[in-house]
Amino acid sequence: MIYSKKFGFTLIELLITVSIIAVLSGLVMINIYGNLAKARDAKRKNDLREIRTSLDIYYNIKNMYPPSVSSWPPPSDLSDGSNGLIKGCNQLTDPQPCLWGSPWTQDGTTFMGSLPRDPKSTQNYFYMRDPSGRLSYILMANLERSFDPDIATSQALCFVSGFSFSPGWYVVCDVK
């Protein structure tokens, strides 16, 4: 009797191999997505710190914070590009809204070469001057990782009476 050797894999071996590769690929993708969200959130926090510095420079020059184009309370998703803008471009006597991503220049003074845009084009930052009388201004960004511990700290510092922030909002304010 002659035995012939078969070369190749059985169907079961192929299915097991493909399943293992799929599970490993899924784990890698979840890890990559989490790191990308973390990086975008870090950029948002840094952007708000940069805007805060520019607001302080504006205050030191003009002895006030710029007005805002906003309504209170802020929208829950911060996607409305016409709400929450800094009204500080053009001339002090005729301030115009500064769009996110455009220069912030007033009376020939540039406060920011470009106001930062949110890393995701589907949402915006939010600025409002003096919503409750206790704060000089409030800046907000919606973080993707709503469990970030900095969120609770920022919201507690910038507490506004009668209003509760959405869970993912990271808040920067000037408390007087």
Image: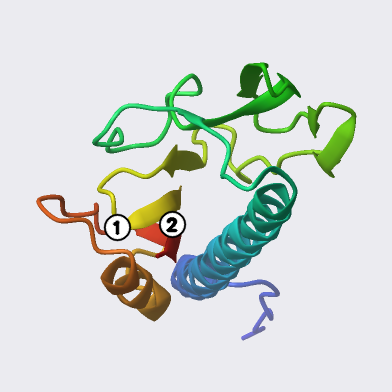
Residue 5 image offset from top left, x and y in percent = 69, 81
The amino acid pointed to by label 2 is Glu
Gap between marks 1 and 2 measured at Cα: 28 Å
Q: Are marks 1 and 2 in contact (CB under 8 Å)?
A: no
Query: Disc 2 on helix, strand or loop?
Result: loop
The residue positioned farthest toward the top in the image shown:
94
Q: Which residue is mark 1?
A: 134
Q: Residues within 10 Å of mark 2 (few under 14, many from 20)?
A: some
**Residue 56 shown left or right of residue 23 in the figure:** right
Q: Earlier in the sequence, mark 1 or mark 2?
A: 1
- Identify the residue at image location x=71%, y=25%: 89
* Total labels drawn: 2
Q: Residue at x 57, y 45 (%)?
A: 64
Compared with 56, 126 (above or below) is above
Residue nearest the observer in this picture, 76 or 126 = 126
Question: At which x and y percent is residue 40?
Answer: 60, 58
Vertical comparison of 76 with 59: above or below: above
Q: From the viewer's perspective, is 110 left or right of 129?
A: right
* Secondary element type, mark 1: loop
> Pointer 1: residues within 10 angstroms few (<14), some, or many (20+)?
some
Image location (x, y in percent) of residue 45 = 57, 64
Q: Amino acid at mark 1?
A: Arg
Q: Which mark is on residue 112?
A: none
Above or below, 110 against 137 in this view is above
Residue 109, picture quadrant = top right
| Colouring mode (rainbow / by chain / secondary structure / one colour) | rainbow
Task: Check disc 2 and report the residue beneath it.
Answer: 144
Residue 112 visible to the viewer: no
Residue 11 is left or right of residue 58, and the answer is left
Residue 105 seen in this snapshot = yes
Q: Residue at x 22, y 56 (%)?
A: 160
Query: Which residue is most to the front?
Result: 63
